[in-house]
Image: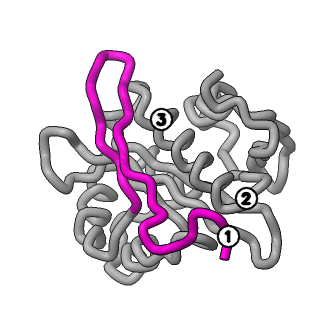
């Protein structure tokens, strides 16, 4: 078993935003399915398009369940929660490890009202720490070229980074072995 994959190996904590707001985060749970669907409904069409590279007007219960059911090792996800509304999700970050490798694809979405406030940066840093703890050496994600906010966030995250263009997207690879996550 990989380090950190035992039962209870999930990280729970808080993210301190630049304005002093404290956002709790924790591993995703099966009980988050309905909250994920509500979260999806709060996203603007542009945010949905940037996350899924297409129009996804509704997050089905089946798809929300797929996102919420993770094993904590190969598939892992964190949710950031609204500090004023119990159980209300304001951000989701996840990774899916490639079979038999130390590589994992990562994705993140933050509610529009919480964007550009530090939630995304804090959530991705916690997600990458969790991935490194689970033996992931390289995290990567695909970003649409017009998603300047996400590309900027990935420049700030504090890991050695490589980028390349691939099928109309920017593939960003982060080396977790050369971590400087608090930079």
Magenta-drawn stretch, dominant element (helix, strand or loop)? loop
As drawn, the residue found furthest toward the top would be: 19
Q: Is residue 145 one of those drawn in magenta?
A: no
Q: From the viewer's perspective, is the residue at label 3 or at label 2 nearer?
A: 2
Q: In the drawing, does residue 77 fall left or right of residue 114? A: right
Counting residues from the start of the chain, the first of labels 2 and 1 encountered is: 1
Numbered tag placed on residue 122 in the rendering: 3
Residue 32 versus residue 92 in the image, above or below? below
Callout 3 secondary element: helix
Residue at horizontal 55 percent and vertical 49 percent from the top:
127
Q: How many marks?
A: 3
Verify CB contact (< 8 Å) between mark 3 and mark 2: no
Counting residues from the start of the chain, the first of labels 3 and 2 encountered is: 3
**Which percent across, then down, holds residue 101?**
82, 70
Quadrant location, the C terminus: top right
Residue at horizontal 36 percent and vertical 54 percent from the top:
26
Spatial distance from mark 1 to mark 3, Cα to Cα? 24 Å
Q: From the viewer's perspective, is the residue at label 1 or at label 3 nearer?
A: 1
Query: Where, by quadrant of the figure, is residue 3 drawn?
Result: bottom right
* Residue ID for mark 2: 136
Crowdedness near tag 1: few (<14), some (14–19) or many (≥20) residues, C-alpha within 10 Å: few
Q: In the drawing, does residue 148 fall left or right of residue 30? A: right
Counting residues from the start of the chain, the first of labels 1 and 3 encountered is: 1
Spatial distance from mark 3 to mark 2, Cα to Cα? 19 Å
**Which percent across, then down, holds residue 93?**
49, 53
* Residue ID for mark 1: 2
Residue at horizontal 74 percent and vertical 49 percent from the top:
169
Crowdedness near tag 3: few (<14), some (14–19) or many (≥20) residues, C-alpha within 10 Å: some
* Span highlighted in magenta in the image: 1-27
């Amino acid at each position: 078993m990989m380090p950190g994959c035992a039962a209870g190996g999930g990280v729970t904590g808080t993210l301190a935003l630049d304005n002093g707001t404290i956002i709790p985060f924790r591993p995703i749970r099966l009980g988050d399915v309905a909250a994920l669907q509500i979260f999806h409904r709060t996203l603007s069409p542009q945010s949905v398009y940037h996350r899924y590279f297409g129009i996804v007007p509704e997050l089905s219960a089946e798809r929300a369940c797929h996102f919420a059911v993770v094993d904590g090792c190969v598939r892992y996800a964190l949710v950031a929660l609204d500090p004023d509304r119990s159980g209300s999700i304001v951000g989701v970050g996840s990774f899916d490890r490639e079979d038999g490798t130390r590589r994992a694809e990562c994705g993140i979405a933050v509610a529009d009202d919480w964007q550009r406030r530090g939630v995304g940066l804090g959530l991705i840093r916690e997600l990458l720490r969790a991935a490194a703890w689970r033996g992931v050496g390289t995290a990567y994600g695909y970003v649409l070229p017009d998603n300047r906010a996400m590309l900027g966030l990935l420049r700030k995250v504090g890991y050695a980074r490589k980028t390349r263009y691939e099928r109309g997207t920017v593939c960003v690879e982060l080396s977790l072995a050369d971590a400087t996550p608090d930079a």
